[in-house]
Amino acid sequence: MNELTLNPDSRRQLWLRAGIWLLFLAPFFFLTYGQVNQFTATRDDVGVLAFSWESSIPFLP
């Protein structure tokens, strides 16, 4: 079979690299997403993109 096998050092290095990217990208995403939402909320010319059938979905609080 053609399975990718990594030795423990490579696997540890891969998890370390993934963790470092996560520590950078997660706050970056939440900060930029919040800023863009706040900016968009101040604008009056932002349209709404929704299908007509979406208005028939019941809202359950």
Image (cartoon, helix red, strand yellow):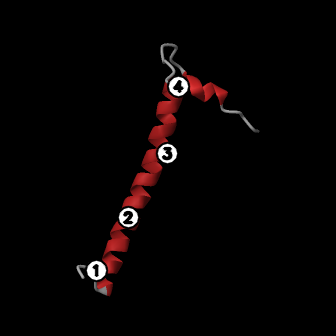
CA gap, disc 4 and disc 2:
37 Å
The percent position of residue 59, horizontal first and vertical second, equals: 72, 34
CB atoms at circles 3 and 1 under 8 Å apart? no
Tell whether label 2 touches label 3 (CB within 8 Å): no
Q: Nearer the viewer, residue 42 or 11?
A: 11
- x 49%, y 34%: residue: 35
Crowdedness near tag 4: few (<14), some (14–19) or many (≥20) residues, C-alpha within 10 Å:
few
- Secondary structure of residue under mark 4: loop
Could you say which quadrant of the image residue 8 lies in?
bottom left
- Sooner in the amino-acid sequence: mark 4 or mark 3: 3
Q: Secondary structure at mark 3?
A: helix
Given this view, does label 1 or label 2 mark the residue nearer the observer? 1
Residue drawn where x is 30% and y is 84% of the image: 9
Quarter of the figure that contains the N terminus: bottom left
| Vertical side of 50 occupied by 2: above or below | below
- Residue 22 point in image, percent of width and height: 42, 60
Q: Amino acid at mark 2?
A: Ile
Q: CA distance from mark 3 to mark 1?
A: 30 Å
Which label's residue is closer to the chain start, 3 or 2?
Answer: 2
Which dot marks residue 20?
2
- Give the labeled residue for mark 1: 10
Q: Which residue matches tag 4?
A: 50
View extreme (top): residue: 45
Residue drawn at x 27%, y 79% as measured from the top left: 3
N-terminal of the pair, mark 3 or mark 1, is: 1
Q: Which residue is mark 3?
A: 30
Q: Position of residue 4 (x, y in %)?
A: 26, 78
Alpha carbon separation for disc pair 1 and 2: 15 Å
Query: Quarter of the image containing the C terminus?
Result: top right
Circle 2 sits in a helix, a strand or a loop, which is it? helix
55 and 30: which is toward the camera: 55
